[in-house]
Amino acid sequence: MTDLEPDATWAVEAARAADAKGGRDVVVLHVGPVLAVCEHFVIASGSNTRQVRTIAEEVERRIAEAGGPRPLRVEGRDDLQWVLLDYGDLVVHVFLEETRAYYDLERLWSDVPRVAWEPDRPAASAASGAGPA
């Protein structure tokens, strides 16, 4: 992140929250230069509707606990195919995997930069080498 890039703190927190609940292919996109309505998108997917709900709830919880805002609007909680959490400058998209593949937002926004972020990892797991082989 450069000094010219708007603060991505809440976007990174949302990405870490999604990852912590098993969100797949979590990306943070800096859409501000080409989209006037917000600065960042976070996109994540879950393998079933229960996981989509869990990811969305964790994003809300973690941002609030870190002193961030509550979403201005939440859409998609009824069918859990695509939950959208609108924070104003940040929009979090939590998809069911099939729905994400259908809409393919990453392709639509392929010309915007991705924001680098690191998942939260317990120190013991990292030190012992535990994790996917």
Image (cartoon, grey):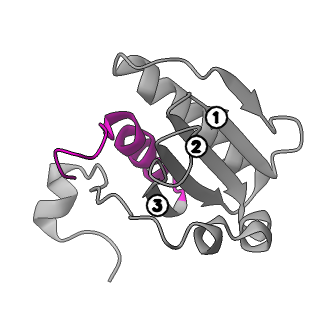
Residue found farthest to the left: 127
- Left or right of 123 on screen, residue 45: right
The numbered disc on residue 27 is 3
Q: Are marks 2 and 3 in contact (CB under 8 Å)?
A: no
Sooner in the amino-acid sequence: mark 2 or mark 3: 3
Element on which disc 3 rests: strand
Q: CA distance from mark 2 to mark 1?
A: 5 Å
Considering depth in this image, is 29 or 69 the residue closer to the camera?
A: 29
Magenta residues span: 1-23
Q: Is residue 83 above or below residue 133?
A: above
Crowding at mark 2 (Cα within 10 Å: few <14, some 14-19, many 20+)? many
Is the C terminus in the top left, top right, bottom left or bottom right quadrant? bottom left
Point out residue 89 in the picture as x, y percentages from the top left corner: 50, 33
Structural crowding at the residue carrying mark 3, measured as other residues with C-alpha within 10 Å and reported as few (<14), some (14–19) or many (≥20): many
The residue wearing badge 2 is 92
Identify the amino acid type marked 2: Val
Q: Is residue 32 above or below residue 101?
A: above
Q: Name the one closer to the observer, 41 or 17.
A: 41
Give me the residue at 22% from left, 45% from top.
4
In the image, which disc is placed on residue 42? none
Residue 127 percent coordinates (x, y): 10, 62
Q: For the point 57% across and 66% down, which residue is it?
A: 109
Q: Position of residue 58 (x, y in %)?
A: 53, 34
Instruction: Give amino acid for label 3.
Output: Val
Q: Which residue type carries mark 1?
A: Leu
Whether the magenta-drawn stretch holds residue 11 is answered as yes
Q: CA distance from mark 1 to mark 3?
A: 15 Å
Identify the residue position indicated by label 1 in the image: 85
Q: Earlier in the sequence, mark 1 or mark 3?
A: 3
Q: Is residue 111 left or right of residue 78?
A: left
| Real-space Cα separation, disc 2 to disc 3, in angstroms | 10 Å
Check whether the beta carbons of the residues at disc 2 and disc 1 lie within 8 A of each other.
Answer: yes
